[in-house]
Image (cartoon, rainbow, N blue to C red):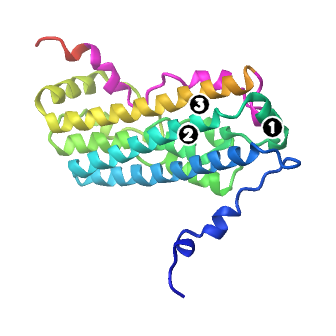
């Protein structure tokens, strides 16, 4: 049987996955389901691209690394824009089916946790939200033990001859990325003397900023929809999301901003 548009994209299966639980069903539940399913697809693609980025950094393929970062940044812009669609749903329209979500919550998105781990925001407490031995827990445990995008970037810098502190190259990759004053001096010199690598640094800053922008729009959407209520699944809702704002994944690239303009 020849491959068709429908068979290649598995459209019959895909279009059967939107199954509202509310009575009727409520009109806006279909939108809610589709938006979040699309988010999970974009999370899958970003994981795919960031794993590829790590491989490209390992090969010191700077042009393709830059192109891959551009793709991820474009996906993030689309993800942020999707919130505009979700905000066409009023608070009362969401409340019409919210109770049907029961314990379900975006807080439980294992792919978003994978993204955080891959970028360096690793916390062992995050593992406890998933049952021991479950596939989702195993995926996160694997990510916990893998080098992050930042670790791949540091090895890229070292391979290019930049004096990255040895303790950073040998750090425990299961721990969160922390600031390093010594590395910041290396990065400042890169900005002053290595235009290609400094461009790569700026794309990583763009990635960090894009993630923070998504968090900000997400928390405002939650505040707009449910106010200060407890989130679905018993999460703290907007109160918890507020604690995630302004938490950079690449803190050294932000810390050097003050010193970059100082004369030597």
Q: Secondary structure at mark 1?
A: helix
**Residue at screen point 69% across, 41% down:** 129
Q: Is residue 253 magenta?
A: yes
N-terminal-most mark, 3 or 2: 2
Q: Which mark is residue 98?
A: 1
| 130 sits left or right of 253 in the view | right
The residue range painted magenta reads 229-258
122 or 8, which lies in front? 8
**Residue at screen point 56% across, 43% down:** 112
**Residue at screen point 22% across, 40% down:** 157
Residue designated by label 3: 218
242 or 149, which lies in front? 242
Q: From the viewer's perspective, is residue 178 above or below residue 78? A: above
Query: Residue 34, how many percent across, how many down?
Result: 65, 49
Residue designated by label 2: 82
Mark 3 crowd level (few <14, some 14–19, many ≥20, 10 Å Cα): some
What distance separates the C-alpha of mark 2 from that of mark 1? 20 Å
Query: Residue 77, how many percent across, how many down?
Result: 45, 38
């Amino acid at each position: 049987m020849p491959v068709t548009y429908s068979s290649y994209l598995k459209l019959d299966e895909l279009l059967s996955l939107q199954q509202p639980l509310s009575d009727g069903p409520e009109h806006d539940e279909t939108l809610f389901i589709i938006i979040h399913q699309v988010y999970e697809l974009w999370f899958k693609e970003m994981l795919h691209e960031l794993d590829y980025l790590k491989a490209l950094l390992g090969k010191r393929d700077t042009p393709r690394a830059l192109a891959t970062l551009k793709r991820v940044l474009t996906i993030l812009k689309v993800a942020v824009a999707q919130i505009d669609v979700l905000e066409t749903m009023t608070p009362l329209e969401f409340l019409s089916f919210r109770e049907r979500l029961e314990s379900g919550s975006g807080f439980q998105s294992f792919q978003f946790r994978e993204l955080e781990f891959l970028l360096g925001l690793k916390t062992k407490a995050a593992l406890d939200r998933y049952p021991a031995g479950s596939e989702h827990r195993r995926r996160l445990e694997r990510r916990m033990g893998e080098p992050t995008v930042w670790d791949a970037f540091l090895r890229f810098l070292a391979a290019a001859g930049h004096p990255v502190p040895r303790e950073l190259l040998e750090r425990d990759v299961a721990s969160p990325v922390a600031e390093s004053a010594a590395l910041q001096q290396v990065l400042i010199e890169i900005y002053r003397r290595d235009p290609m690598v400094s461009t790569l640094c700026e794309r990583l800053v763009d990635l960090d900023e894009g993630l923070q922008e998504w968090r900000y729009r997400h928390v405002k959407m939650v505040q707009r929809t449910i106010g200060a209520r407890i989130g679905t699944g018993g999460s703290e809702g907007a109160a918890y999301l507020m604690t995630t704002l302004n938490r950079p994944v690449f803190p050294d690239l932000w810390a050097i901003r003050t010193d970059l303009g100082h004369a030597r």
